[in-house]
Image (cartoon, helix red, strand yellow):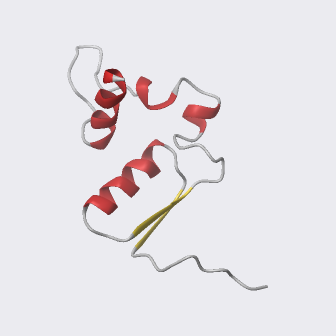
Amino acid sequence: MGTELFGEYDVVVVGGGVSGCSAAIASARAGANTILIEKLGALGSMMNVSGPPGWSFSHLWNDRGETIIAGIVEETHHRLEKE
C-alpha cells in the first residue's frame, strides 16, 4: 500500500482541536513549514462539533478573574469577541 505525499513539512500537527490549532499557529509563526491535519473537517474539533461553541468559550480566567490562559487562545478569544 503506497503513501501519497502532499509536500514536505518541518512540523506536522495531527488534530485540529484547540491545542492542535494553537500548536500549528505557533509553529508557523516561528517560521516552520507547518501542516495541520483534522479528520472532522472543522477546526476546534469536538468543541465545535458537539460541545460549547468552540474557542469563544475557552476559560481564560479563574473564579477570581485572574488570567490563567494566554497566548494564541487568548488572542483568538478576543478576536471572536470583536466579531
Q: Is residue 75 above or below residue 53?
A: below
Instruction: Specify the quadrant that holds the N terminus.
Output: bottom right
Q: Is 25 positioned to the left or the right of 7 in the image?
A: left
Q: Nearer the viewer, residue 82 or 65?
A: 82
Q: Is 63 positioned to the left or the right of 46 in the image?
A: left
Q: Is 54 positioned to the left or the right of 23 in the image?
A: right
Residue sticking out furthest to the bottom: 2
Q: Residue at x 45, y 42 (%)?
A: 18
Image spot of residue 21 (x, y percent) = 43, 49
Number of numbered discs visible in the structure rendering: 0
Q: Residue at x 22, y 26 (%)?
A: 67
Image spot of residue 27 (x, y percent) = 33, 62
Q: Is residue 60 above or below residue 17?
A: above
Residue sticking out furthest to the front: 83
Q: Residue at x 34, y 22 (%)?
A: 81
Instruction: Specify the quadrant that holds the C terminus.
Output: top left
The image quadrant that residue 64 belongs to is: top left
Residue sticking out furthest to the top: 64
Image spot of residue 82 (x, y percent) = 31, 22
Image spot of residue 60 (x, y percent) = 31, 27
Residue sticking out furthest to the right: 1
Q: Residue at x 63, y 33 (%)?
A: 49
Q: Is residue 80 above or below residue 25?
A: above
